[in-house]
Amino acid sequence: MNEAVNLFHEICTATWFENVPILLFLNKIDLLKKKLKRVQLSDWETDYKGDNSYGDACEYFRHIFETVNGVPMKRKIYTHFTCVIDDSVPDLLKVWQVLFYWKVILLENV
């Protein structure tokens, strides 16, 4: 987790991306849901203070990544929780979700 946050911080603070909105995909939510049934999130994330619900856990991870945004006034981060290999969601719907996020980004930044 720390490696992912550090890498994201490097991307956010790079001058090339200073004025560019970022679409952040947090993948493998299926594994997160399974793990939350077995283990308390606070056991492996000592800063976590919420309950062990999936929604609170997602907000916690969203907050971690969004706080490393080097220029929050110039750039917005759009966070999306996903499971790329989820067979219950058709591939076309996954593509539509990505296109929807890009449409939102374009409309807000043009």
Image (tube, helix red, strand yellow):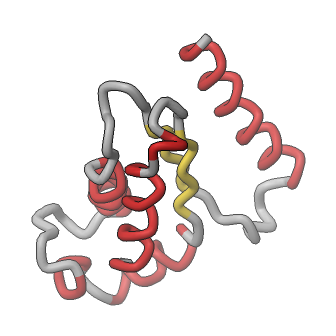
Q: How many marks?
A: 0
Residue 94 is left or right of residue 41, and the answer is: right
Above or below residue 64? Residue 66 is above
Write the residue at 80% across / 67% down: 87
Measuring from the top left, give residue 89's x and y in whole percent.
77, 56
Whole-percent x, y for residue 63 in the image: 28, 51
Q: Nearer the viewer, residue 4 or 87?
A: 4
Question: Relative to residue 79, is residue 56 depicted above or below?
Answer: below
In this rendering, would 54 be left or right of 79?
A: left
- Which of the 4 image quarters holds residue 77? top left
Q: Nearer the viewer, residue 110 or 101?
A: 110
- Is the C terminus in the top left, top right, bottom left or bottom right quadrant? top right
Percent x, y of residue 71: 32, 36
- Foreground of the two, 5 or 33: 5
Q: Residue at x 45, y 37 (%)?
A: 18
Identify the residue at image location x=76%, y=34%.
Answer: 99
Please, is residue 86 above or below residue 17 in the view?
A: below
**Which residue is at a point 35% across and 56% down the rendered structure image?**
65
> Residue most toward the right?
92
